[in-house]
Image (cartoon, rainbow, N blue to C red):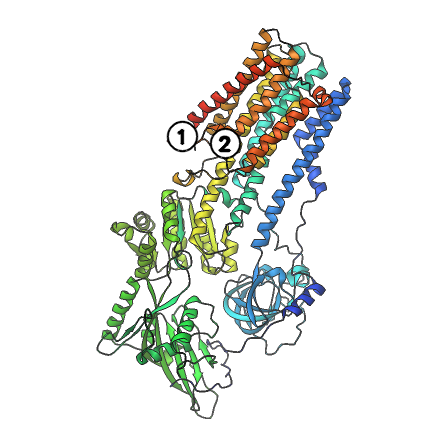
Amino acid sequence: MPPEKKSPSAKPSDGQSPLQSSSTGHGLTMAEVTARRAAEGANLLPGTKPVSNLALIRKVLTEPMFLMLLAAGAIYLALGNRTEALLLLGFVFVVIGITLLEARKTQRALESLRDLSAPRALVIRDQQQQRIAARDLVRGDLLILREGDRIAADALLIQGNVAVDESLLTGEAVPVQKIAAASTAAEPTAVTPNIAQTAASKAIADSHTLFASTVVTSGLGQAQVCAIGSNTAVGQIGKDLAATEQPPSALQLASGKLVRWVGSLALLIAVCQVFLAWWWNDQPLLASLLSGVALAMAILPEEIPVILTVFLAMGAWRIAQHKVLTRQVSAVESLGAMTVLAVDKTGTLTLNRMQVAELATQSQTGSGDIFNPINATQLPEVFHELAEFAMLATPGDPFDPMEKAINEFNQRWLAGTEHLRDGRTPELEYPLTPDILAMTKVFASAKPNQYVLACKGAPEAVADLCHLNKAQQDLLQQQISAMAERGLRVLGVARGHWNAPAGSEPNWPTTQHDFEFTFLGLVALADPPRPEARAALAECRRAGVRVIMMTGDHADTARAIAEQVGLCDVSAAEHAAVISGTEIAALDDASLSQRLTKVNICARLRPEHKLRLVNILRAQGEVVAMTGDGVNDAPALKAADIGIAMGERGTDVAREAAAIVLLDDSFTHIVTAIRQGRRIYDNIRKATRFTFAVHMPVIALALVPMLLHWPALLLPVHIVLLELIINPACSIVFEAEPESAQLMDQPPRQATDSPFNLRHLMSGMLQGLGVAAILLAAYGWMASQAWDPAHSSSLIVLLLIMSVYLLILANRDLHHTAILGLFSKNPWVLRMSGAIALLLLLFLAIPWLRQLLGLTLPNAPEMWVAGAVLLAIGVWLEVMRWVLLGLLRSGKLR
């Protein structure tokens, strides 16, 4: 018989394993929350402040480019050219303004990412469970704590039992057991231990008190917040755990090394330039110094650090718009090199929205009856007891998707019957443990000292508790296998009775094996695959990314889902094969490595199996990304090249161990992250190629005239003018470049590939050297025609500025002719052309600006020459585009 009454909860004896049940509190109201937040502030630890404008300006003032501008300005003043000196100093303020805008843009992106990655807490407010940002906690909030949660504030445990890792405060690695306080005050007061004084602080030893930033390693509990922010124990000793500084990525380190190397080379060449101009060309020393400064400014690729800082930060922010949070900006680099993606099944390939698909009873002589809710109008009486006890063994307000499905099923099919036992309070609960994969709830019945037991769990575990004979076990295994082959997850359900000694408090058994159970049947649940998963997996295959399922589910269930989403080819036996955790444990590393080449489905895995698989795949040279959601997944997430934590169902520990967090646990978003990672890396390569291409003609026009005894073609003021075009092109135009249509049709790049390797840099330099040769040839021709040197040099400067724009178009997309880039989806292309046209118009139309820059209005013959030169540059860049495209398709330029 089902339980007929609610009775007062009995207290188990000390050391007993069952968890005592009690009702949860209603929590604060939103009005109380608002009032307390206004009075006490946000739950924030002392954090790092954003970089101030003054600090940014100070950084600009110490940049090599700025120092060279100052040097050039000083030389102009020494030469008596005050106007040119003032113009250079004016450009300094423009450069500072651009730098501030870029820094603020990057900082806003990083701050947005920090807000998304901030710890979150599950609280009860207005009688409802809510997941909120930890900063929104207030004193008096009711926290619900589960395994893997990072505690967001100091609190008093008022229900349940949890073990907490307090090594952050005490240095002791052994988790501390916490038990619920016997009673709580209406307004708990803060505990303020002097942790710095002693590791054995009395407050730390308090078995009821929980501290902010410590981690729940096991158990379930409810706690009331008693201190927030700086008033917490961690806040008092100045621990800054909320704000994290991103370490430099591998690309940033490589770019810094490159810039230092090129900067040293620039200084050496500039010194040689000064000596040659003074000795070879018999120029005055100050004029020679000015030409040397101009050459150093031309050589220094100061755009490279800007490119990486802006691209990686903005790239991480753009990925976040697709519900993928990048906790480590360096992970953006690895996404494009990913070769293996190890994914869980539940919630990633499936909807994680469980539904009861079948009920199955078992008789002594046959397989019993089966109920399928599809097209059914009512639940036959033979299944009522099975459904009833499955519901009794399930919490009233469950968190687990399977338990939610059981409740929803019973609310529908048992409505109006005596079997719908809603809101029953168990006297005792025996939780699921690694030794017994089943849980039992104990209810009081209508008879004194008699209790009803409701048990559910893994069918094998429940069958063991029911002591089924061999024939019954074989029959049960056939039922389980048949259901698993259809992709169903199966739970066993049993009922039992227990009589307590009369006239005394119940002396509860310490284990579920001490009860007598009767096996009632099986509840099969289905987690349908995500509709978009098949297309996303096909895209992964097209992109050369191998997907391996790593799940703790039954092998048949895993295979069924894999076939439904297209993970494995049903016709290819080797790819439909499954390797289990038991087989993995029995194989040595060499044999397992060989087996993994033919298996894409790994089932019945434990966390240590996942870690071993990740390490073996990496040893094979693969770049591995892995998804995980639990505390025990943290080692494997850290071991993977890219750890991906589930944002919806993942624990705080898993999120902190991962480099990427899915805000929506969908496989599609992982594929989106791969695509975005490739786009970001591709755009970095384009911007780097453009940077080295555009510096070649600038260097040539600053160096060659001196060697040929020509007048100086480029002055420092011209180079600064070019920087005003080149910097926005690198940090804005190329960063906003949309992905190419062929991006996901290419294999992953090699992990050792870099946009700074010599082959890639040479491709850009060849582009620029061709442009430089054409411009120098044009100037030489004009000189041979005895044209006015002032007009000739002015025309070359104007052509160089227009060549910069042609180089932008040529490097945006190698798959299309440069001129078609004007009609790109990138809105900044046309804006940049308009800005350059407006800039040229201003410098040519305003006489004093024209005079300052040493420009002249071009006449008709010069216009014809300009057209011919631009045509020649366009043809050269088109030829180079075809060459680079061929190298790219052959894999020689990656």
- The earlier-in-sequence mark between 1 and 2 is 2
Does residue 4 sit above or below 693 in this rendering? below
Query: Along the line of sight, which residue is nearer the eye, 867 or 365?
Result: 867
Q: Which of the numbered marks, if any, corresponds to residue 892?
A: 1
Report the number of discs. Answer: 2
Work out which residue is located at the far front of the displayed protein and give it: 860
Query: Along the line of sight, which residue is nearer the eye, 578 or 783?
Result: 783
Image spot of residue 346 (x, y percent)? 40, 60
Image spot of residue 283 (x, y percent)? 69, 11
Q: Which amino acid is tagged 1?
A: Lys
Which residue is labeled 2 in the image?
821
Label 2: element kind: helix
- The picture quadrant where one finds residue 292 is top right
The Cα atoms of the two marked residues, 1 and 2, are separated by: 25 Å
Query: Is residue 510 at least partly visible in the picture?
Result: no
Quick check: marks 1 and 2 in contact, CB under 8 Å? no
